[in-house]
Image (cartoon, rainbow, N blue to C red):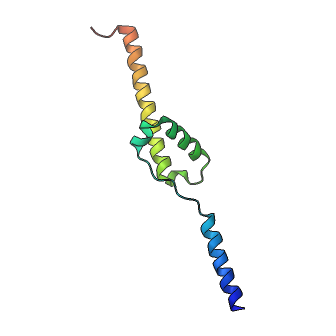
């Protein structure tokens, strides 16, 4: 009986460890700014992830996406002003 309990415990532990997935390393905001494909992939992953707000990669990818959107918006506004008033030279 003792042998069966030990075997069951070892089997349970092995199953629990095999079920754990390897964690993806945390990337910085700069990484996601420099790698648009990785940013888009992570944003898509985070959309379906439970508790994505607590995941460092989701937060960093989101911050990078917001930075890119702000820069694009700033460039679009600058281009609009230049088209109306010229480049000032």
Q: Residue 12: image x %, image y %? A: 66, 75
The residue sitting at 59% across, 50% down in the picture is 49
Q: Residue furthest bottom?
A: 1
72 and 11: which is toward the camera: 11
The residue sitting at 44% across, 48% down in the picture is 27
Q: Residue 26: image x %, image y %? A: 45, 52
The residue sitting at 56% across, 46% down in the picture is 46
Q: Residue 66: image x %, image y %? A: 45, 36
The image quadrant that residue 87 belongs to is: top left
**From the viewer's perspective, is residue 25 above or below residue 40?**
below
**From the viewer's perspective, is residue 76 above or below residue 20?**
above
Left or right, 18 with respect to 58, comes to: right
**From the viewer's perspective, is residue 62 above or below residue 5?**
above
44 and 51: which is toward the camera: 44
Number of on-image labels: 0
Q: Residue furthest left?
A: 89
Q: Quadrant of the C terminus?
A: top left
The residue sitting at 47% across, 43% down in the picture is 61
19 and 42: which is toward the camera: 19
Q: Quadrant of the N terminus?
A: bottom right
**From the viewer's perspective, is residue 70 above or below residue 18?**
above
């Amino acid at each position: 009986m003792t042998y069966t309990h030990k075997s069951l415990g070892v089997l349970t532990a092995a199953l629990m460890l095999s079920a754990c997935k390897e964690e993806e390393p945390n990337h910085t905001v700069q990484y996601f700014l420099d790698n648009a494909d990785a940013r888009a992939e992570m944003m898509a992953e985070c959309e379906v992830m439970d508790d994505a707000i607590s995941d460092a990669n989701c937060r960093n990818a989101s911050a990078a996406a917001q930075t890119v959107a702000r820069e694009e918006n700033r460039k679009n506004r600058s281009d609009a002003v230049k088209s109306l008033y010229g480049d000032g030279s």
